[in-house]
Image: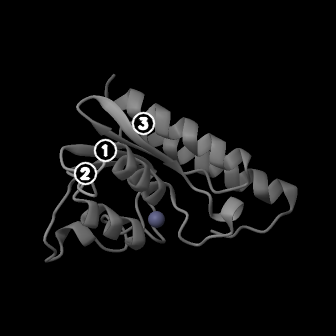
Amino acid sequence: MDHKDYMRRALELAAQAGAEGDVPVGCVIVRDGAIVGEGRNRREENGDATAHAELEAIRDACRRLGSWRLHRCTMYVTLEPCPMCAGGIINARVDTVRYGTRDDKAGACGSVLNLFEERFNHHPRLYRGPLERECQEILQDFFQGLREDGAGENG
Ligand SMILES: [Zn+2]
């Protein structure tokens, strides 16, 4: 599997979130070529402001690996992490983050600010892509669908 395969899996999880009425964001965590954690946005499903894809994937990986330290792990997430999730990534010592598309309103990995460049004790490597266009489109399609349904956007 390569970078695109992992991001494709994150996109599948994002699509599941969208089907449940949540903003479609998905996340996988990979170590040594194997997916060790998966998550998707469940904010609406759980009625929980903290139920973001990245935190769910971090919890899943910590449980499966039996450690809070996610050394040698790469996170693939379809949308640029917010401050809460960037904080979780730092706390979990995730080595590398690859995000699909920018979040100009809430992104904490270069858009609004970049938490990974601040004076914290861990600095994940950061890349944009692969599949940036697909990651953008799944969000655009979701919000367009909401508008067509006449439902309010909550982003
Ligand atoms: Zn987040």
Residue 43 in sight here: yes
Element marked by disc 2: loop
Image quarter hosting the N terminus: top left
**Of labels 3 and 1, the one closer to you:** 1
Tag 1 and tag 2, C-beta contact below 8 Å: yes
Element marked by disc 3: helix
**Of labels 3 and 2, the one closer to you:** 2
Viewer-proximal residue among 105 and 61 = 61
- Residue displayed at 25% across by 51% down: 70
Rounded to the nearest angstrom, the CA distance separating label 1 from label 2 is 8 Å
Rounded to the nearest angstrom, the CA distance separating label 3 from label 2 is 18 Å
User: Residue 118, position in %: x, y?
Assistant: 18, 75
Mark 2, residues whose alpha carbon is within 10 Å: few (<14), some, or many (≥20)?
A: many
Rounded to the nearest angstrom, the CA distance separating label 3 from label 1 is 21 Å
In the drawing, what numbered circle is on residue 7?
A: 3
In the drawing, what numbered circle is on residue 70?
A: 2
- In this view, the residue farthest toward the right is 150
Mark before the other along the chain sequence, 3 or 2: 3
Viewer-proximal residue among 43 and 132 = 43
Mark 1 sits on what residue?
A: 65
What colour scheme does the image use? Answer: one colour
* Tag 3: amino acid: Met
- In this view, the residue farthest toward the top is 1
Mark 1, residues whose alpha carbon is within 10 Å: few (<14), some, or many (≥20)?
A: some
Image position of 98 (left or right of 136): left
User: Residue 124, position in %: x, y?
Assistant: 20, 57
* Tag 2: amino acid: Leu
- Residue displayed at 22% across by 66% down: 116
Viewer-proximal residue among 10 and 135 = 10
- Residue displayed at 30% across by 61% down: 89
